[in-house]
Image: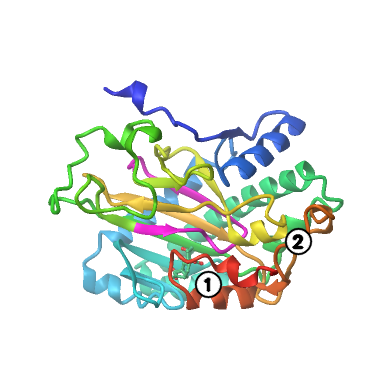
Amino acid sequence: MRSKKTKAVGIPTVDLSSERSMLKESIVKACEEYGFFKVVNHGVPWNVIARLEEEGAGFFSKPVQEKQRAGPPTPFGYGSKNIGQNGDMGELEYLLLHTDPLSVSDRSKTISNDPTKFSCAVNDYTEAVRELACEILDLVGEGLWVSDKFSFSRLIRDVQSDSLLRLNHYPPVKDCINGWDPPLSSHLHHHHHHHQTPHHQYNNNNKTPPIGFGEHSDPQILTILRSNDVPGLQISSHDDGLWVPVPPDPNQFFVFVGDVLQALTNGRFRSVRHRALANTMKGRMSMVYFGAPALNAWIYPLPELVSADKPTLYRPFTWAQFKKAAYSLRLGDSRLDLFKIN
Ligand code: GA4
């Protein structure tokens, strides 16, 4: 085994059971330096995770015609290969759901033969990860010395919150085309300084497997991801843009800073660019919660994060306006630029 090389190089880990003042500092530090971290001792019961995983695996194992009954994915449902509506594609299939229980219950009729069981698994999971996201955001509020520490979490606790849940399935890649080396080689586990490709020149002749989900940042506030034990996720380092492979950990969660949190913190946190490679002998499945504000919520930097030497970076916008901009651009585009002052 190459166990010594699979160390989570450069990936910060936050232990939610550690003492609060230490915890809030380590979360703020991870958000500043990476826009990304792993959470351990998160308190989400295993059965909540396992039940959704089972529902997802059950759905993706169905014949394609049956899955297509749950499509198209716009706005919600089953999608395959196409991402968004502007020509982005990836080697994956997925279910995209709004987290509103009424929407889940309506969608589940075309997704599962036991819609009630499916809805319950989705709702229980969503509730648990939303709580986790809110807990993290309250710690962020404290760590940034914001006078109302609930300023961030309130946005995603709103009953009108536009939060989403996404199940991604990256089928195993069997054939090696374009000179791609099968995952027997150890390049995915090497320290990222050695020979990870910078994010503007992936794929083709130099050992990068097909793209499962292309490079992007998440538009929302905070993303909570859980995957099975199959690798593929990579984050882009804030320092040098090099790709850092994230070793999978089915028992833990990964947290991503989204574009809206970047705006709320006036750029003190930056959203993390990431991607998934379909580099696997085994299928990868991820379950991703995107914590978002209500469509009519106004987003502007918290006053505590604005000063003479840190002037306001982005003009105020509603989540609806930001979402519209995001959906009009390509996956990898930088939407926040449209809202920059100057
Ligand atoms: C990225 C984060 C979420 O998966 C998502 C994606 C959405 C989609 O798949 O429809 C987008 C993408 C995501 C950002 C830019 C737009 C919208 C595809 C796309 C090209 C559901 C989201 O909210 O934004």
Q: Quadrant of residue 315?
A: bottom right
Residue 328 on image: x %, y %? 49, 78
Magenta stretch encompasses residue 224: yes
Residue 215 on image: x %, y %? 41, 57
Residue 232 on image: x %, y %? 34, 46
Residue 60 on image: x %, y %? 29, 60
Rounded to the nearest angstrom, the CA distance separating label 2 from label 1 is 19 Å
Quadrant housing the N terminus:
top left
Disc 2 secondary structure class: loop
Q: Could you tell me the amino acid type at mark 2?
A: Pro
Please name whichever residue, 314 or 252, is drawn nearer the observer in this view of the structure.
314
Q: Which residue is mark 2?
A: 301
Range covered by the magenta-colored residues:
213-231
Q: Quadrant of residue 320?
A: bottom right
Q: Could you tell me the amino acid type at mark 1?
A: Ala
Which is nearer the N-term, disc 2 or disc 1? Answer: 2
Instruction: Please tell me whether residue 228 is drawn above or below residue 67 in the rendered image.
Output: above
Report whether 43 appears left or right of 216.
Answer: right
Q: Residue at x 49, y 75 (%)?
A: 327
Name the disc covering residue 127, or none. none
Instruction: Please tell me whether residue 3 is drawn above or below residue 36 in the rendered image.
Output: above
Please name whichever residue, 266 or 184, is drawn nearer the observer in this view of the structure.
266
Q: Quadrant of residue 264?
A: bottom right
Mark 1 neighbour class, 10 Å CA radius: few under 14, some 14 to 19, many 20 or more:
many
Query: Does mark 1 have its CB less than 8 Å from ligand 1?
Result: yes
Please name whichever residue, 10 or 163, is drawn nearer the observer in this view of the structure.
10
Number of numbered labels in the structure image: 2
Disc 1 secondary structure class: helix
Q: Residue at x 68, y 61 (%)?
A: 263
Q: Residue at x 12, y 51 (%)?
A: 175
Asked if disc 2 and disc 1 are in contact, CB closer than 8 Å, the reply is no
Q: Which residue is mark 1?
A: 326
